[in-house]
Image: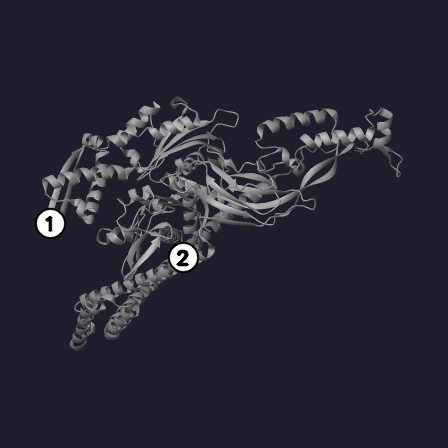
Amino acid sequence: MSVVGVDFGTQNTVIAVARNRGVDVITNEVSNRATPSLVGFGPKSRYLGETAKTQEISNLKNTVSSLKRLVGRTLNDPDIQIEKTFVSAPLVDIKGQVGAEVSYLGNKEQFTATQLVSMFLSRVKATASAELKLPVSDIVISVPPWFTDVQRRSILDAAEVAGLKLLRLINDTTATALGYGITKLDLPTAEEKPRRVAFVDIGHSNYACSVVEFRKGELNVKSTSYDRHFGGRDFDKALVDHFAKEFKEKYKIDINTNPKALVRVATAAEKMKKILSANAQAPLSIESLMNDVDVSSMMKRDELEALIQPLLDRATVPLEQALAEAKLKPEDIDSIEMVGGCTRVPALKERISKFFGKQLSFTLNQDEAVARGCAFSCAILSPVFRVRDFSVHDIVNYPIEFSWEQSPDIPDEDTSLTVFNKGNIMPSTKILTFYRKQPFDLEANYAKPEMLPGKTIPWIGRFSVKGVKADSQEDFMICKLKARLNLHGVLNVESGYYVEDVEIEEPIPEEKEAEKKDAKENKDGEKKDGDVSTNPCISNLFPLTCVLEEPATSAPHRLKGLFKDAYADAKRSFLGNRPLTNASKQAMDTTEDKANGIAEPKPKTRKIKKQVRKGDLPLSAGTASLDQASKDAAAEKESQMFMEDKLVADTEDKKNELESYIYELRGKIDDQYSEYANEEEKTKLKEKLEQSEEWLYDEGDDATRGVYVAKMDEIRFVAGPIVGRYQDKIEEDRQAALKAEEEKLAKKRAEQEAKKKAEEEAKKAKEEKEGKKAAPDASAAAAPADAEMKDAGEEVKADGVDEPMEDASGKK
């Protein structure tokens, strides 16, 4: 398995993978670390990524860009009208979604934005798989924080169509914060003051700022603000508009009437912007821009800043909003991390630094930080890698409310409730409680449509609850629905069930413990919103029949309100309002153990009512996601187009192979192969090569793969004997050289062995000669020694041993 993180950008996409105990950004088929986010269509196949960029100028009407900003939108959305100025392909409406109309395989085709994104993700999948040499499945993709539910669902559908398992849709700034924090070993502990970092991300089309608090092992996003139409392309557009006016006056040409000229000027303007970020002035020169007119110009950095002054005036607005929502001041921020290609513009850096009153930090890779954070997130969620524990707490950017039809049994009930407020932690789960006698429907919407991008419809989904009916006493059924805002930022009602009140007995805690428990309950009751009784018998006391609860985190039941009063009444009626004496308590609360005769106290109990889950409620949901049939059809079409692309690529490879083989033989026939062919064979081969070349550039320019293979076989049939003789001669020479080398090595080994044998014999002879000479000398030296031993008349005794003395009688 593999772990892949993708920074899906408007202009470029960066792919990072977790491997070798770290995260690496991988290169594509042309060794670039960023792949253009483009999808193009041609008469034979699609162009994805780099190939689409190569074909863009000559194939403008069939090349679609800004894929990320098209998903989940409608054609009449004001934001899409803005995108039309940046997208060269015609945009159309396809069943309520925006799409593109292109010419593919000679026919007019329409593709939705979701389909276009799935095509590009297929290219991303192939690139990662080729680099890792493994199948790619698990993936994390970044999206702007302002993406709505419908946009996020579109990305999820596109990933599924592309055959990818999307583990998480993560916000750009959150991914950057994760990549920053997970590698830090000096973060403060839970008891210390958190480290507050502002992440400023200004990319090609989007500006976002998030204030994040870091503690050891976790990050908490405190606020996120953004400007959806502030980025590098807006700077480029200011330059293009300036040069369009200049060229109209200077060269009498209007580039706005020529799409190709407009794109070429935009490319040159982008290059000029990058040069001006590091230099005081930069030139612009384009040959034959239009009408065979060459253009040139010069611009200084001061002139550029004057052109983009309206943009620079908006530079601090997202920063102010982010601090206001986090309830912080500029001096409360410990560090400002800058990411995104547009943060290299000096004027922007100057204004942001002045706003915070401190130096900016550029410790993160501005182009790759988001992709690295995505890869870390994927590694955390994937079972393949073991990663340091690090919790990520993102926030809700748009408040979400649920609405429902009024129950006929409760005429004064409320019909809506805000469940997820702006700034709430994400992911999170809420339990909704309803009192109903018949099936009912819920509808989820964004509570404040004015906060949404463009004219996005605030509708999120409709959820129908089935199987609801009155109980045997014709009373309300208590229905509980679990609403979850998941890791992707997508809302779902995951499950539904109904409960009943059941009377059970539970031990009565000691007096002190009970007091502590009541105090704790009161404290919890103050903290928890909507923590009220759910007894259907008292539903008439609550006009609001939807009760919002947090999911239960502990098993013990909490005695509250009506149940506590009911227990007190039951106790008084049982005892006749008489206090229990110690003797009566002992008689009531102890039993005799018959086995050992020891009396054990019986715990005090009380009867309470507790809600018990009795069964599930069927749910049906209607959301902006594609139904399974549509996704299957899109996946099948994507697979078909992928195979067509593969066939075209293989055919092109065979065509290039044939062309290369023709040129190779033509160069060798009069050189390397000359002595291995007679004149007749040479003439025949040359004629065949000439015929094949003429066919290749005429009729064979658009042939099939099989035809190219057949042509290759025909040439090999003619050239085979010549090439065979040449290879036989090469093999013969190789064998002769090998044999000569072996003989040389054998001779060398024989010489070494003879030399070694001679040395050993000489050494042996020398040793024998020295041995004979040493023998007489040893005999002469041994004779005096023997005589000396004979002259010694004393016995030799062991050291330290004395013989016993004999007395006069001869006894010892």
Between residue 665 and residue 364, name the one nearer to us: 364
| Direction from residue 84 to residue 789 in the image, left or right | right
Disc on the earlier residue, 1 or 2: 1
| Direction from residue 593 to residue 370 in the image, left or right | left
CA–CA distance in space, label 1 to label 2: 44 Å
Between residue 779 and residue 343, name the one nearer to us: 343
Indicate the position of residue 127 as horizontal and vertical percent values. Answer: 36, 52
Whether residue 725 is visible: no
**What SS does tag 2 mark?**
helix
Tag 2 residue: 634
Tag 1 residue: 292
Q: Is residue 32 above or below residue 593?
A: below
Indicate the position of residue 543 as horizontal and vertical percent values. Answer: 59, 34
Q: Please say which color scheme the image uses.
A: one colour
Indicate the position of residue 31 as horizontal and vertical percent values. Answer: 30, 49
Q: Which residue appears at 13% of the width and 41% of the height?
A: 247
Quarter of the image with the C terminus in it: top right
| Direction from residue 37 to residue 252 in the image, left or right | left
**Of circles 1 and 2, which is in front?**
2
Task: State the image quarter where residue 662 is shown.
Answer: bottom left
Indicate the position of residue 801 as horizontal and vertical percent values. Answer: 69, 34
Identity, as a three-letter code, of the amino acid under mark 1: Asp
